[in-house]
Every structure is written in C-alpha cells, then in structure tokens.
Image (cartoon, rainbow, N blue to C red):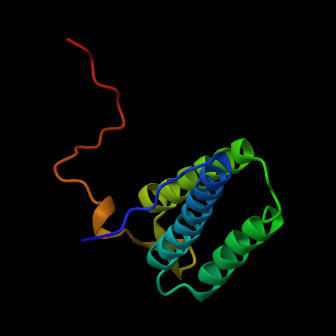
Amino acid sequence: MGTRLKVTDSRNLQYWCLLTLFLTVLRVFKDLHKTRRHVFKDDDGALTAARLKINEEFKKNKNETSEENIKEMLKTARAVETILRENVIQGEHVEENKILLRPRQSLLLDNVPYSDTPRNKT
C-alpha cells in the first residue's frame, strides 16, 4: 500500500506548492520542445531558432519568485505551444514563386469548402 505524505504545517505546504509549480514549469518547458520538434520537423534552421528562443525565455525568467508572475508566464507559454501546434504549417520554396506546404495530419480538416465570397445568412 502506498504511503501518503501529510502536510502538517505551513512550511511544508509552501514547500509542496513550490515543488508543484517547479514541476509544472518543467512540464511546460518539455511540452514546448516536443511541439517544436514536431512542428519544425526536417527544418534544422527553424528547429535551432525555436530551441534557442525557448531556452532564452526560460533562462531569462529563471530567478522569478512571484508565484503569480510564474503562473502568468506559464499561461503565456501554454498559449504559444497551442499556437505552434494548431496554426503553424511548414513551407518549402521549390521554385521562384512556388512554395510547397507540408501540413501535419492533425491540421487537415475534412470536407471544409472554401469560397472567396461570403455566404448569405438565411
């Protein structure tokens, strides 16, 4: 049977809150890198640039102690990860005025008609 740790005083509670926050930061950091590797697959330049930017932002804020500020930065990082995962499509120049798009399977939509003219509401 597993052992449960009991939080007996406010110091222990504060410790566990900080540990939980640290683990959340680590999880978001790893998720961003996982998404970066998936989104920019086979694009060494973009992979490197994204890795450097992610690492730079986390290093820049590594001494932040305000729980409120950390939670706000985590919220922003999650939003960035979502935007990368859901909105970025790789493209490759194949000719002077031609780009080959490489959408990931998760971005493809079934049966979504496109029209330049707006539809009239009935």
Q: In which image quadrant can residue 80 be found?
A: bottom right
In the rendered image, which quarter contains the N terminus?
bottom left
- Position of 5 with respect to 108 (left or right) is right
Residue drawn at point x = 54 percent, y = 54 percent: 78
- Position of 40 with respect to 115 (left or right) is right
- Position of 41 with respect to 96 (left or right) is left
Q: Nearer the viewer, residue 57 or 104?
A: 57
* Residue 9 horizontal/vertical position (percent): 61, 48
* Residue 38 horizontal/vertical position (percent): 44, 76
Residue drawn at point x = 33 percent, y = 60 percent: 107
* Residue 58 horizontal/vertical position (percent): 73, 67
* Residue 71 horizontal/vertical position (percent): 64, 47
50 versus 83 height, above or below: below
Q: Nearer the viewer, residue 63 or 108?
A: 63
In the rendered image, which quarter contains the C terminus?
top left
The residue at the far left in this view is 111
118 versus 51 height, above or below: above
Q: In which image quadrant can residue 109 be found?
A: bottom left
Q: Nearer the viewer, residue 106 or 70?
A: 70
Residue drawn at point x = 28 percent, y = 60 percent: 108
The residue at the far top in this view is 122
Q: Nearer the viewer, residue 119 or 80?
A: 80
19 versus 110 height, above or below: below
Number of dots carrying numbers: 0
Residue drawn at point x = 59 percent, y = 47 percent: 75
- Position of 111 with respect to 24 (left or right) is left
